[in-house]
Image (spheres, rainbow, N blue to C red):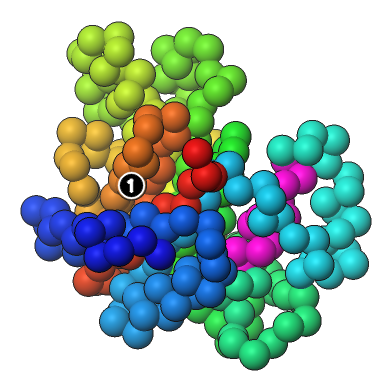
Amino acid sequence: MNNPADITPTMPAQGTTLTLLKATPTALWHEAREACDDALRQGHAFVAILHGMEAFADERVLTDEDRQRAARYRQAGDRHNFVLGRNLVHHLVRPRGISAPCRFSIGPRGKPFLPDAPAYNLSHSGRWVACVVSHDEAVGIDVETFARLKDYRDLLGMVTHPAERHCIEQASPEHGLALFKRCWTRKEAVLKATGEGLHDNLPGIDVCLQQHEPVLDHPMPLRLMHLTADHDEATIALALNPSLPGVVAMFVDQPR
């Protein structure tokens, strides 16, 4: 981990402390686990965000079933992201002192979890992989590069609540695109926190685009936050229990 100058605590208006850590790949898993455990001890959520870290996609932590699943991915990037996700869970979530590959259980809504371990959620897009860990089950994260997005306006009817659509359509084209990305990632994070995944009622959820850090009461009480990387390639949204006092987010980028 870098020196204390790379640790930046902030306090949004709603009172959730956000601490940003910038780390190098050196001793990645040890430093990330230490930071994660420390955050959880304080009752905070921990987020690890990896960019360009394909070299850390270690298949030795996979079960035989997961190794077969990884082999079925046609694109190397998709395979790396799957394996990196499993590595994040292996190194951050499972109890210490266990070296055997993780075997996951599935909750009633299809959300995977590890028994007797903190809750977690994973997301990946492009060369980005993110994992959030919390003692509270209601937690979700979404990272998107929108590399394949064409005209976002074609999706407004399928995705947006009327209030969101009005907000986006009243903005300039450039700002409207940024608002659409915020809308999409917030909704993904919300639905992953509830364990529902994407469903047909996306327009029924209002993620309050005009608010910096809204607290929703539907579909369940959730605080929405955004995490900003050094460059704007990815949009990252986080949904978590509003009672959590803080979030610690560690960014790890490929060596330049």
The residue at the far left in this view is: 13
Residue at coordinates 54% horizontally, 45% vertically from top-left? Answer: 254
Q: Is residue 166 left or right of residue 184?
A: left
- Residue 72 in the magenta stretch? The answer is no
Question: Which image quarter: residue 166?
Answer: top left
Q: Nearer the viewer, residue 130 or 35?
A: 35
Q: Residues within 10 Å of mark 1 (few under 14, many from 20)?
A: some
Task: Identify the amino acid type marked 1.
Answer: Leu
Q: Is residue 173 above or below residue 242?
A: above
Mark 1, residue position: 227
Q: Is residue 250 left or right of residue 27?
A: left
Main SS of the magenta segment? helix
Q: Position of residue 248 (x, y in %)?
A: 33, 64
Q: Position of residue 225 (x, y in %)?
A: 29, 50
Q: Position of residue 111 (x, y in %)?
A: 61, 63
Quadrant (top left/top right/bottom left/bottom right) for the N terminus: bottom left
Q: Is residue 219 left or right of residue 208?
A: right
Q: Is residue 223 above or below residue 43?
A: above
Q: Nearer the viewer, residue 74 or 242?
A: 74
Q: Is residue 193 left or right of residue 227?
A: right
Q: Is residue 64 above or below residue 190?
A: below
Residue at coordinates 81% horizontally, 67% vertically from top-left? Answer: 60
Question: Which image quarter: residue 68?
Answer: bottom right
Residue at coordinates 22% horizontally, 71% vertically from top-left? Answer: 245
Q: Position of residue 117 (x, y in %)?
A: 56, 82
Helix, strand or loop under label 1: strand
- Range of residues picked out in magenta: 78-89
Count of marks placed on residues = 1
Q: Nearer the viewer, residue 39 or 161?
A: 39
- Residue 82 in the magenta stretch? The answer is yes
Q: Nearer the viewer, residue 69 or 111?
A: 69
